[in-house]
């Protein structure tokens, strides 16, 4: 019987555990290694920020993976040895027959001098702790900025700005708040192409949210951000730090450069029986840019990796990753725009951004509910 070890119990790891349930039913061992006690979807952070939901109601215990016949090892992996097919955690040393690395990408505010002065938009605990400060804001400049690349869920900062616009309107203080977004990139969502960027930037403009591209942050100071060229003062700064692969991935020799680069169709790495999925991988698109880091891709890639493992165990047919993905950008007023497309097309991604609708807003809630119900 084989032992399949899944590193990380986030979007990709949980999708893998579910997809591997035929292996568990056939008597193989599936182990998910994840130190966190609970899982919630990243999109909930913005609802917490806007005060429309709490974290607890969208959180589920990792114990739920047992529904799929998987075991949960509540520990942190500290070493991966592909040559000997072993991993080490703080408490144990585990051999594997197959490995799926789904360790995600970590926001690293310490890479930007002074970033601790900002509210880290991608840190759930910090967002929960400081949300009252945002919600009670009485007037001044609120900046939502991307401090460095890459970062996951590219639309999220713009979505945050539009949810804040909605919040301040509902509170009757919008005319006293100036909202500004900034990014080091030349446009809002480069992966969505010129039309997609125009659609997002039009939504920002329609709400009076200023959009500043090509703003490369050098450092953050109390009350101002210093860019390579120019600066921006702020009364409240919500920031997305640059992301990096977890240290264990780099130290294990799995990464080429900053990220793991598996075969884009099968998610196999160069190491035998080792697959890598989700934010920890870098897959180039035909236009040379990397595939955006998003949960839908982590999930689809996890299913692909699992299908190859099941195939090798004689339990099914393999599938390949096609690069289709979608997400919803909330714009306030219980509406969302849907971003959808084929990101691995040639000569470049074919992506559309729809007009915001209430249906898409509801679809986003169903997106969360379905995953929590299916995985845990
Ligand atoms: C505000 C926000 C909104 C978002 N909205 C969307 C959305 O609407 N749609 C969408 O598709 N995506 C969205 N995303 C992006 C999505 O959350 C990520 O792309 C997705 O979680 C990536 O999945 P993953 O499995 O690669 O990594 P993760 O889900 O981050 O999982 C990685 C896991 O590995 C664990 N881990 C790390 N190091 C170790 C270690 N040493 N040992 C063991 N475990 C470890 C971590 O604890 C974590 O649980 C959003 C993200 C944010 C921040």
Image (spheres, rainbow, N blue to C red):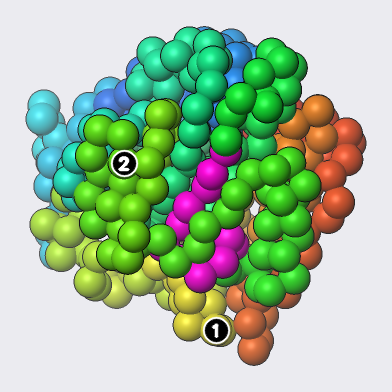
What SS does tag 1 mark? loop
Residue 13 circle label: none
Q: Are marks 1 and 2 in contact (CB under 8 Å)?
A: no
Residue 308 visible (yes or no): no
**Hey, which quadrant is residue 190 in on the image?**
bottom right
Please state the horizontal and vertical placement of residue 18, each as a whole percent of the image.
Answer: 56, 37
Query: Mark 1 and mark 2: span between their CA atoms?
Result: 35 Å
Q: Which residue is drawn at the image coordinates 58% and 54% (left, top)? A: 211
Q: Nearer the viewer, residue 53 or 197?
A: 197
| First to last magenta residue range | 179-189
Q: Quadrant of ligand 1?
A: top left
Quadrant of the image for the C terminus? top right
Please state the horizontal and vertical placement of residue 339, each as a whole percent of the image.
Answer: 73, 55
Q: Nearer the viewer, residue 145 or 44?
A: 145
Which of pointers 1 and 2 indicates the residue nearer the eye?
Answer: 2
Which residue carries the number 1 mark?
287
Q: Is residue 306 left or right of residue 317?
A: left
Residue 254 visible (yes or no): yes
Which residue carries the number 2 mark?
224
> Can residue 234 be found in the magenta stretch?
no
What SS does tag 2 mark? strand
Residue most extreme to the bottom? 347
Please state the horizontal and vertical placement of residue 110, each as a whole percent of the image.
Answer: 18, 43
Q: Is residue 147 left or right of residue 185?
A: left
Earlier along the polypeptide chain: callout 1 or callout 2? 2
């Amino acid at each position: 019987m084989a032992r399949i070890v899944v590193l990380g119990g986030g979007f990709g790891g949980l999708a893998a555990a579910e997809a591997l349930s035929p292996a568990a039913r056939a008597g193989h061992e599936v182990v998910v290694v994840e130190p966190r006690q609970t899982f919630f979807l990243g999109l909930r952070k913005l609802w917490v920020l806007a005060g429309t939901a709490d974290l607890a109601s969208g959180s589920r215990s990792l114990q739920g993976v047992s529904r799929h016949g998987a075991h949960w090892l509540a520990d942190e992996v500290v070493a991966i040895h592909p040559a000997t097919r072993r991993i080490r955690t703080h408490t144990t040393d585990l051999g594997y027959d197959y490995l799926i690395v789904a360790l995600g990408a970590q926001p690293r505010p310490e890479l930007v001098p002074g970033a601790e002065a900002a509210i880290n938009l991608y840190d759930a605990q910090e967002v929960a702790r400081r949300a009252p400060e945002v919600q009670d804001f009485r007037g001044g400049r609120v900046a939502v900025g991307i401090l460095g690349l890459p970062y996951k869920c590219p639309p999220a900062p713009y979505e945050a700005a539009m949810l804040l616009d909605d919040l301040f309107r509902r509170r009757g203080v919008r005319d006293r708040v100036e909202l500004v977004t900034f990014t080091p990139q030349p446009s809002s969502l480069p992966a969505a192409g010129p039309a997609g960027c125009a659609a997002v930037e039009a939504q920002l403009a329609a709400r009076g949210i200023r959009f500043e591209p090509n703003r490369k942050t050098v450092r953050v100071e109390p009350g101002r951000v210093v860019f390579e060229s120019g600066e921006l003062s702020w009364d409240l700064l919500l920031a997305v730090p640059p992301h990096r692969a977890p240290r264990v991935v780099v130290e294990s020799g799995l990464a080429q450069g900053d990220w793991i680069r598996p075969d884009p169709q099968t998610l196999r790495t160069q190491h035998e029986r080792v697959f890598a999925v989700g934010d920890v991988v870098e897959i180039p698109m035909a236009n040379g840019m990397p595939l955006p880091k998003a949960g839908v891709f982590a999930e689809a890639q996890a299913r692909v990796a699992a299908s190859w493992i099941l195939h090798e165990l004689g339990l099914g047919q393999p599938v390949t990753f096609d690069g289709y993905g979608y997400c919803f950008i909330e714009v306030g007023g219980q509406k969302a725009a849907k971003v959808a497309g084929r990101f691995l097309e040639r000569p470049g991604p074919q992506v559309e951004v729809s007009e915001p609708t209430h249906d898409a807003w509801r679809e986003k809630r169903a997106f969360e509910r379905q995953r929590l119900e299916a995985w845990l």
